[in-house]
Image (spheres, grey):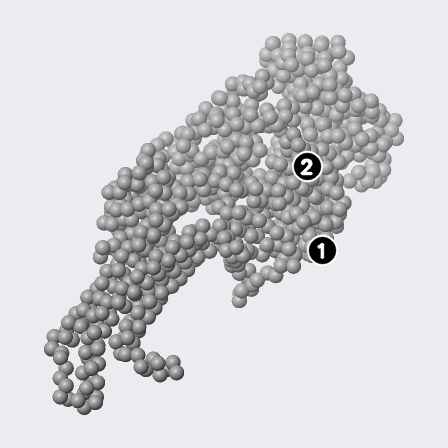
Amino acid sequence: MRRKIFKQVKLSTKTTLLFGVGLTAIAASCLFLTRHFFLYNIDLIEKSQVLRDNYQAQAIIELLVEEQEERSYDWAYWDETYELVTKGAPDYRKRNLFYDGLKALNIDLMIILNREGRVIESVIAKKLMNADGFVKPVSTELKQDLFSGSGLQPYLDHAVTLSDSLQRSRSGLVSVDDEIWVFSITPVLNSLGEGEVGGWLVWGRHLSSIFPSHYKKVLSAKNTIQIDHSVKVIVGNNNSISAPLVTLDRSGEHLSARVSLSDINGNPLGVLTTTEPRRIYQEGNRLISRLAIVLFAVAMVIGGVTFYLFRLKVGRRFTVLEKGLQSLAQGEYNSKMKVDGNDEVSMVSEAINQLLSASSHTRDTLNDVVQKFDALYHSSNLGLLMVLDGKIVDTNKTMANILAYELEQHLIGKTLQSLCPNDRSDVCSIEFMYQAIRKGERYFDVELLSADERKIACKLEVTLIHQQGEEALILSVKDISKQKVQEGIIQQLEQRDSVSGLLNRQSVFTALRPALSTHVTDGDNNKLAVLYIKLERFNVISGIFGHQISDSVIKHLAEVFSGFAPNCLIGRVAESEFIIAMESEKNIAEPDLCAEKIIQHMHQPLIIDGVEIDLSVSIGVVFVCSSFKSIDELMRGAEFAADRARYKKSRIQVFNREMVQQAKNHLMAQRDIAKAIRLGEISPYYQPIVKSDTGEVLGFEALARWSHPVLGAVSPAIFIPMAEERNLIVALGEQILNKACAFISVLNQCRAQSGLNPLSVHVNFSSPHFSHDSLVPFLEDILTKYAIRPENLVIEITESMLIGSASDIIHRMNMIKKLGVKLALDDFGTGYSALNTLCAFPLDIVKLDRSFVRQLGGDPKGEVLVRHIVMMSKELGLVMVAEGVENQAQKNTLVSLLVDEIQGYYFYKPMSADDAFDKFSYGDRLVRKALLQIIR
């Protein structure tokens, strides 16, 4: 029925209806396609942005994990930590594990395990309401969670089975009590990174408390971490973690990028979610919806008008044509069609006019679309510039705000090159941008000049368009100045020493490597010089005055070095060691002059917080040449020269070719000293001390000697400072004391068999050894072990060891004297302060420095001074011993001055234990030999 009705409709009506329906379909299709592609591109932009924000959050977490693992090596390769896990250190926790220390390391938890995985020390930081903090041992529950199958235990179980050479550190995330931590576990080795693994060092940082709250200024979007151990890790074809999954929430107002996180064992841990509001998409959707309503209304009006006009004008023509065709079909040829030859042309012209009318309406509609897009253009959160022939022809308000212009019109008409600083004008050239676009490059980091001539760091995106038949550029500009500031702060923390503000060791080495390569390759010898500066007795300053004063000293030195060496590379490479690298093209003596200025400045007293600090440095100067194959060789040469400088009056030593082998020997000694102490290869030699008037031997001074299998005899002036720097001096002192007590015990037993008087032995103590908490118990054990009469043991200390809290030092000395052990002041003769020392401290013996002995016989003033010192010592009831006696005249003078005892080459040189037994035991040779085997 409907088909019959439609067939009865006239052709004019059909044509009109089809024309109206077709016009409506075209309008609807254009609108649909415009909306689809417009919203599709906006959707892609927003998804790209949320992905970038998600990658940024991932990068921060990865940076925290990697940085913690790298920093843990300093503690894991610290000899004191190694001693803790292998031998035990009762005072380790007191000295190292405190709240400020953990916060300085940017960690909240530290656990130290021995080789079997047992916890030796553990501590966790807690913060109070008043911003102070404290530390306490890690709870048993937390340890159980941490060392469970989902924590660090799988790594430990595997590490225990590995050989020491295969041990590696590991770091990652761990979930503890629904909180996420960053943990690193590092094998504990000695400072050389050699030997057996003593245990493991575990560092933890509470990630949930700092992420993302501490990084809001860096992060561009909202980030959350949700713990979910059941989450599935999505992997691609290459078995790697795929890109984050972008999802749309139910309301359609936010986009989220979700990526799965794995824990330290590679198991699922949770999900990192980055959320961005869909502002641009929603605004675009609203604009398109409004545009659809307008277009629909316009299309309906146009359709109605067109339908009416078509029926009025064209339909009438079709009626005439129908009648003629009907007559022709019916064979009524006599009926002529009243149609001129112009009717069809008129009809076609009218149709064209109608199409042109429709086109006019279409242009109006497109103008409306352009206006809507223009509104979006000016409301963008990005600065936009349209550049034609190198000039700015259009911009938006955001761009004016970025560059601090009051109105957009102030930017229009300017050349693009005028917005760039002179040193970066090439980036703003049109030729450069077109070349970059041809290469597929669209993104650039540039600096643009603001209205007040400030440089604004910006991210630039370039898009090529066609404007009025010519090629133009659309520049999308984002202000990243705040981001650059944050990056600068992070870079500053990574590259600078936190106390001095100078470059740290890693940054110094990184900066010097290309310079070393350039100078060596070009044969530019003696043009680059390195000054290696060692601050002496800095550990004494820290121990006496505390870290606040010592930090002030470091800051003061940083200012001094920067003042004497401006525009030079300056860094702090160790606690009390600094580097200055300078070019000496104009004046080859410039490094020496700089070193001399620093030495002269150190002669001036330094007062910090009312405390006068006496500073001294030794400086090694090295000129870069082809002899140095690496930065490590250069640094070793500079450090060796600095060590040699301490024995020179000028305190400056220039590294020369003759020192190359010495430096290699020095490095070999540094490498082997720990092993030598561990194997007991450093042994005491014994120099007799005699009664001045009779020459009778009263005792010995035990002097440490090291016979290296390759280097031969190594001077104590070399290996004792090495032991101090590497915290081995206490172990060395205990070893010498142990051997000396064994020697004197056996010697006195042999002498007792021959009816001879017992002899004493003097042992030199270092400052760390004398102040060690276990000293008094160790002395008690030694006296008991070797059955020594306490008065036959004399401990020699120096005056510098008595600086500090006098009450604490006197208490320690009295504790030693209660054992019956005697105390001697070595190297006496430093002026009035030394005389005060004799009165202030409970001493038994005073050893006159050899510098006074050298003056005897040639300097009457020196003899007078010695006479008064001897008189004062006798009045105080002290025994006076003169060191360094080398000739008869010195001996006679000292006897006349009533010096009690004498020591020096005039009587005896230092001798081995075997030689001392041969000369002074007088016992049965077989007994002596058996006893000597025991003490060895």
* Residue sitting farthest toward the bottom: 331
Q: Is residue 285 visible?
A: yes
Position of the C terminus, as image quadrant, is top right
Q: Is residue 915 left or right of residue 926?
A: left
Q: Is residue 67 left or right of residue 837?
A: left
N-term-proximal mark, 1 vs 2: 2
Residue bearing the label numbered 2: 126
Residue bearing the label numbered 1: 149
Q: Is residue 504 above or below residue 258?
A: above
Name which quarter of the figure residue 609 lies in: top right
Q: Is residue 581 left or right of residue 577?
A: left
Position of the N terminus, as image quadrant, is bottom left
Numbered-mark total: 2
Q: Is residue 678 above or below residue 312?
A: above
* Front-lying residue, 150 or 512: 150
Name which quarter of the figure residue 672 lies in: top right
Q: Amino acid at mark 2?
A: Lys
* Front-lying residue, 742 or 626: 626
Mark 1 residue element? loop
